[in-house]
Structure formats: structure tokens, C-alpha cells
Amino acid sequence: MSSRALRQPLSLRLTSNIFLAFWCLVAIFPIFWITVMSFKSPVDAFDSNALNVIFGPTTLSNGNGLSLLDIILGIAVIWGTIALVFKKMPAMIRAYSREGLEWFGWVIGILAAAVGFLVVFFVILPAILNVLNPLLGPLGRDILGLTTEHYKTVWIDRGFSNNFKNSLIVTSGVVILSLSVGTLAGYGLARSGSNLAFWLLIVALIFRALPPSALVASYLPVFISSSEWLAPILGENAPTLYGKPFAVIAVLVAINQPFTIWMLRSFFQNIPAELDEAARVDGCNHFQAFRRVIMPVMWPGVITTGLFSFLLAYNDILVTSLLLDAQNQTMVPAIVGMFNRETTTTDQVVAVAAAVSITAPLIFLVLIFQRQIVSGLTAGAVKG
Amino acid sequence: MNFRTFAAFVGPSVFMMLLFIAFPLISVFKQSFYVTQPIYETVEKETCTPGFLTQTCVTETVSQPRLDEEGKVITQTQYVGWESYRNVLEPERAWRAISDGNWNVLSTINFWKALRFTLTFTLITLPLVIVCGLGIAVMINNAAHAIRGPVIFISLLPFIITPVIGVLSVNWLFRGDGILTALLEWWLNRDIALFAQAWTIEVLMMLYRVWHVAPFAAIVFYAGLQTVNQDSLESAVIDGATRWQRMKYIVIPHLMPLIIFVSMIHLMDSYRVFEEIVGFASQGYVISLQWLTYDFLVPDQAGNRSISRASASAMLTMIGIAILLIFPLRRTWRDHKGGH
């Protein structure tokens, strides 16, 4: 607000900010609360008194707790890691990695940071604290009940790591395939002003509105009997498509394709057409212009679209739960199974821990890619 | 760009959409008129239980699926016409219920029940999402520059979270004596069971959906607010317009294309409401159209999937989408014509 005429009175700004704070509370509360619940023993997690859920007296009396010192040092380590990654690492990567191989430097850097953090946080820190806690008296006494046993149950006993692996396969497959197919189409659509391009976009818009369940209704019988009708082509070892991750990847890519090409098209339209005209004058054909001139300046748009493809694949439940068998199940359908099967409160807290495990990567994603997500949300909209 | 280059660029994408979207649509349409089921035969079966002196033998006729040499169930596909649609819609019962004015009977038929909920859900959440999104956007725009980043980060969380997980987390806050139910009970000083009747579940679902989509609307509107012409706002102040009038006559008309965009996306997405039913496990009380199709596709106890009925219900669902899309498509068509 540059102009004095538009300056707002204090009371209005105060009300606005109070409501904003209230919205932030509403936005974050359910996620915060299930995170807290997942670290408590079942009695505490479902206690109707909020303070009992936060401090976890039963969890504490079971011998699982954190002292003030634990909390302070733990926060210090997390804070230190974040500071290191955001302040020091970019400079180090620029200094040590060779020209053109920066992405490799980033991969190495992030892996090193993750491994370093895990070692310090889960090996070195507990060892130090075991020595320090008894020495410090009141500071070292446990005050906050906290247990990680539900995470152990989920990831080790319930085979959630297998679901995680399946999710990884499906989502990475979807992202790679839909970006490689989508960027080509998006570029073609952005640069062609023909009627055909317009109609393709309209049809894609209609396809975007279709309910996935309708499509799955047609895949199911075909996929289940695929070994029969593929036999004449592929012979004896014709696969049953039902339950196979690659079939689901293809389906999800196709379902996401309308969205992907709309988004990429609007990013491509932002790049001036003079750029590829110049390349064409210099003797490139369309594909060379696309690869050498357009792609290098398109990475932000591709990353943004990739993020949304990732979200669509990661969050999907309908397609994956119907088309994958139990062995290849991804995380989200698996947790619904867990939630519906649960009988005891312990099972419920285990399901809560699984839910938090699914959410954590998404929060990191927002943390790192906030700018890209915002630009992706507004890309299609602002230009109409 | 000539046609061949265009086709080469667009080809793979179009091929995938044809193979996995257009072709399946046609086959769903066809499937909805056919039923595939095992061939049953009636066999006389003698079961004997050993008894004292003589065994007692009972002969009964059982109907069982016929098997081929490999022991697989033989199935046959039969043209049944509109029967699957009739099974889904139950037109006679529905018509009788309507002519008697007996809405309770109508809501015992799954399809009508699902349609009723899907439409109420879509139409009630739409204005809430727009108003909340606009409110949040204006508030973010009012806030100091330093806190906008963190606030947008927090606002994005409900939008980015896996829908089923979001629903489940709301569910855990309210289920049984969950923390918020306890709070409500303490506040109203009475016992509350939020999952014992349909309407409270529906309210929770709508609240969840607004929580989930409002951030998206807010971010889009916030981006739009950055481009509002400051000069016209200023001249409005000089002309003596109140805050509310400035909002109504300058800001909202400026945001109108975005409001239409968000409404379109929201209509499409909330018409496909599905995750809420799964996350709240509310199928006993509330179901939606997409959930109905899903339910037909899940194998029942005998392991059979009612593909035909699922196809019929999917086709009926898509009629709604067609109605939903007519107006925006007509508008786009007019713009396109006007642009050339």
C-alpha cells in the first residue's frame, strides 16, 4: 500500500490479522494434532482432555519421555541442519561441482545432509543424552511423554515399507512419463494456433471432468482377462495387467494428461515465440529448437507441472485401490484398509502414525517448492 | 507449424488419451447394456451323514456355476438392454415414492440418495469456498510483507495434503470422544454423537471440503489481487467510496474471471466427491455418485464385481457432468469464435 489514501485504520488491520491468525490455526490444527497423537500411547492419544494428549502422562509413566534437555538439544540439531542446508550448502555445491553437473552436486549434498542428520539425531544425540540426563537433575527428568513405537509397528511389522516402495515406483513412473509426453504436447499446442489444437484442448477439458471411477469400470474387465486377449500377440507369457504397477502408471498418466497439457501449454505460451523463430532462422528444425532453445528455459514450468503430477499420483486412492492387488498396494489405499480393519485403540494410533508418515513428505515438498506450487496454481488461472 | 510437426508433438499424448480415456468411455457405454455372469446349472446332490444302522441321505437340488475342463467358471455375456440402468435407478419404486410425496422411500434407493448428496454437497460448498477463499486472500493481502510467505506456506498445507488423510485427520478429531467433540460437548453442555446420523456427517464433510479447497481459491485470488489497478482504487477513495463499495465495484469485477475459473474447477471436483465417503466410512449413512460406481466395482463376498451396473451408474454420473459443462463450453466456444 504505497498511497496514503489507501492506508487502513489500525482497527481494521488488527481484525484482519486476528482472523488471519485464526485461519492459520484452523489450517494447521488437524495436521498438527494427528502428528501429536501419533507419538502417544493409545490412552493418551484418544484422551478427551487436550493437555493430556499433548503431555502424555500415560506415555510418560510407561517410561517413554523426553526431558527438557532432550527437547532443547533436539531442536538445536534440527535447526542446525536446516541452517546448514539453506545457508551453507548452495555455496558449497557451487564451489565443488563441475560446470553443468550442479544437479548431481545437489543430489549428493542432500543425501549427505539426510544421512548426516539421521546419524546425529538417532545415534550420536541419544548416546550423549544418556550420559548427560542423569547428571543434570531436574533438567534431565522426563516431562513430555513421547514414543515412536507406533512408527516401528507401521513400518516394520505392518509392511508399510513395501507400500512405500510401491508408491515410489508408481509416482516416479507417473511423473517421468506424463512430463515427457506432456511437454511435447504442451509445446505443440502452445505454438499451433490451428482449430485442431483448440478442439484438442476442449476435449481435454471434458476429459478432465470425468470421474475416474467411470474409466476404471472399463479397465477392470479388460485388465483382469488381459492374459487371454494378449496371448495371440505375446504368446505364453502374456501378462495379466490387473495388479501390475506399470498398468496403473499408464492409466494414471492418461488420466492426468488433460491437466498436464493445459498447464504446460500455459507455461509455454509465456515463452516468446521469437525465441524459437530465432532458432529456426539459425537452421534448427522444430524438434531441435524445442530441445536446445525452449527446454533450457522451461525447467521452472516443467518442475511445477511435475509437482502436480506427483501430487495426483501420490494422492490417488480410487485407481490404485481398484487396479492393484494387495502385494503391489500403494500407501494411501493401504492406510484405508488399516483404518477400516482397526479394532483396538492401539490399531487406531498405528493408523494415525501411518497417516503422518504419508503426510510428512508432502510437507517437505511444500517447504522446498512453495514458489513453484503457487506459480502452478496461478498459471492457468490468471491468464484465463 | 505444419500439421505433421504438430501431429508428431501431440501424437503420444493424444494416443494415450484415446487409448485410456476415449476408448474406455465407449466400452463403458457398451458394457452398460451387457451382463457377464457365470452359467448356472441345477444339480441333484445327495448328501449322506453316517448314522446308526443306516445312513441318512438327503437329496437336494443345488444351483452351481458350470466349470470347464480346467476347473474355471464358464461365463457368458448377454445383451440385457436397459436392465442394468433399471437396477440402478429403480424407476418404478422411485416414481411411486415421488407420486406419493414420500421422500424417505426415495432415499432408500442408493442412486437417488447418492445424487441428492452429491448435488447438495456441490452446491453448498461452492459459495463457501469462494467466500472463504476471497476472505483469506484479502487478509493475506492486508498482512505485512514479512509474514505473507509463512502464511501462504501454512495455507497450502490443507490443499496439498492427501485428501483421504485430510478426511481421516478430521475424522480422528471428532470420532467418539475426539478432542473437538469433547470441546463441543463442554461448550453446549450435552452429549453429542456426530457419527450417528446423516446430517452431522454431511456437515463435517462440507467443512472438510471447504478447508481443503479454500486455500486453492485463496492463492488464485491473492495473485489476482496483485494486479488490481491501484489508480482506480485511489480515485474511488477520492470520490468517496467506502471500503465495501471499492470491494464491490472494483476488486470483485476485476477478480470475476478468476472466480469463474475457481467455481468451474470446484464444480468438477466436488461433483466427483469420493474421498470423504471413504475417510469418514460413512457408507451406512451418506454416499456419493462416484462412490456408488466404486462400490459396484469392489468384489462382493463371492468375488463378483457388478461391472454392468457400475457402467450404468458411471454413464448416469456422466450425464450430470455434461450438464455441468454445457455453459462454460458454450462460453469458450463463443470466445473462440470472437477471437478469430
Image: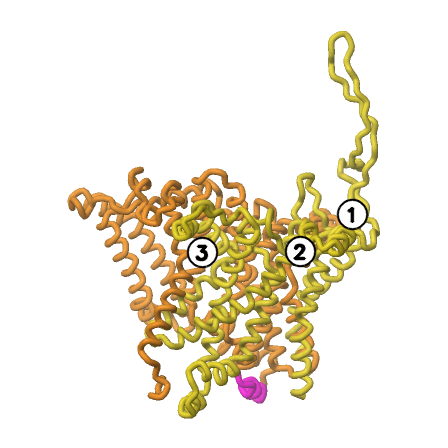
Q: Position of residue B140 (x, y in %)?
A: 40, 73
Is A4 inside the magenta-drawn segment?
no
What residue lies at 68% left-to-right and 54% top-to-bottom? B103
The residue beneath circle 1 is: B36
The residue beneath circle 3 is: A359
Q: Position of residue A34 (x, y in %)?
A: 41, 51
> Observer-nearest residue: A321 or A175?
A321
Is A272 inside the magenta-drawn segment?
yes
Protein image colouring: by chain
The color chain B is rendered in? yellow
Region of the chain picked out in magenta, as a range: A271-281
Indicate the quadrant where residue B267 lies: bottom right
Q: Which is the main secondary structure of the residues drawn in magenta?
A: helix
Distance (Cα) linking label 3 and label 2: 26 Å
Q: Position of residue A192 (x, y in %)?
A: 64, 82
Give the tally of numbered discs. 3
The residue beneath circle 2 is: A216
